[in-house]
Image: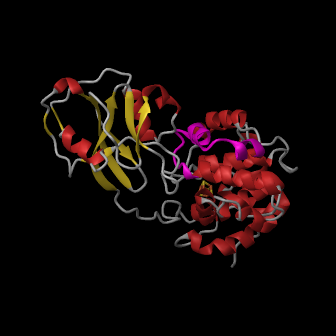
Amino acid sequence: MSWPLSPELLAPLAPWFERVRRDLAWRAQDLDAPHPDPYAVLVSELMLQQTQVATVVPYFARWLERFPDAATLAEADEDAVHKAWEGLGYYRRARFLKAAATSVAAEGWPGDLEGLAGLPGLGPYTAAAVGAIAFQWPTPALDGNAFRVLARLLLIEGDPKARAADLRTWLVPALGALGPSRLTQALMELGATVCAPAPACGACPLGDHCAARLAGRTADIPPVAKRAKPRASTLWLVAFEAKGQFLLQAPAARGLLAGLWRWPTFDAADHGAEPVLRPGSITAWLGWTQVYTHRREAVTPLRIGLEAPFTPAGGLRWVPGTELQGLPLGKRDQRLRDLLVTPGQPPLESPDPARLIRACAAPSA
Ligand code: SF4
């Protein structure tokens, strides 16, 4: 490893960060002392995984108001936790946060990185970030932003994650010299705002010594990973309504969608469209494309009015319309909930309601 020493190379980050740092609710004023509220750091780190700062700001404020400390969150009802997370996506994070808070409330904060990494939902990056920002431990936190900055700064060929162990060792002296919390947050900030995928090198405090910049290689370092094409599907998203009640899928206990209520969906490939025979009973709204990391759904929302509820199959429940607002739903399903109070159109065609009902009804005895 013939990299320049990290304290010297990264030193300009400290005065730069002092100048540009945003005043965010989870940031301590004093970056040389342990954070006064490690729980706030934990909440912010989990919220910031895969979510932009601007989106997190109002969620963080509401969350801390609702669950001001680990003990309150540990005792909170699961539905209330999911409801407070509603709209942030990746709901696993909310469950991990509650589980981590439960552990902290019962046993206190772990005393080292290994203990932090053992808390639910804290991978090596989040554990190291919480260690550095909350406790001032010299634990190098490498996320996608930090890998990109360091790959360019040190002209690392290939995937910089393959050099993670070397990079962590290299960073430790700089964490000691510049302060773990300050350096960790400065690196994140630089990666998010200046050394973005298309870097603004003219505004970079590290520009004079950045090897990729000096070599004219900022465009190809690090190499962009090829993403698999997202799987495409076309769905009917259906709100069956009968006597003021709506049919929903109750939350699963595990998996990506655990804790969330869902509308029944039907793949258009299996449930083709036919002319609507009783237009008054079906309402449609303009569809949209829902984009997830690995899939894209073309969604058509429908409300199908029934004269009476049927006995639903396992996992489906009739829920009074008055309770809909209080249920935690994912983003796609929130959209249909919001549409239900807006005027829709009678569709020209829809899947056959009788077939959909058969798919959702309990088998008759
Ligand atoms: S000079 Fe450019 S490529 Fe190098 S670290 Fe700064 S922003 Fe990134």
| Residue found at the very far bottom of the displayed protein | 1
User: Is the stretch drawn in magenta largely helix, strand or loop?
Assistant: helix
Q: Quadrant of ligand 1?
A: bottom right
Q: Left or right of 321: which side holds 195? A: right
Query: x, y (%) of residue 20?
Result: 71, 41
Q: Left or right of 317: which side holds 114? A: right
Query: x, y (%) of residue 65?
Result: 71, 33
Q: Residue at x 34, y 50 (%)?
A: 296
Whether residue 41 is visible, yes or no, is yes
| Residue found at the very far front of the displayed protein | 365
Q: Left or right of 227: which side holds 154? A: right
Q: Residue at x 40, y 40 (%)?
A: 248
**In the foreground, 75 or 2:** 75
**In the foreground, 26 or 198:** 26
Number of labelled discs? 0
Give, as a single range, the part of the protein colored magenta.
Answer: 71-92
Instruction: Look at the picture and state if 333 lies above or below 90.
Output: above
| Residue found at the very far right of the displayed protein | 33
**Residue 250 drawn in magenta:** no
Query: x, y (%) of residue 109?
Result: 81, 56
Q: How is the image coloured?
A: secondary structure
Q: Residue at x 62, y 59 (%)?
A: 143
**In the foreground, 365 or 280:** 365
**Residue 76 drawn in magenta:** yes
Instruction: Look at the picture and state if 169 lies above or below 295.
Output: below
Query: x, y (%) of residue 120?
Result: 66, 59
**In the foreground, 365 or 332:** 365
Whether residue 11 is visible, yes or no, is no
Asked which quadrant contains residue 183, the reply is bottom right
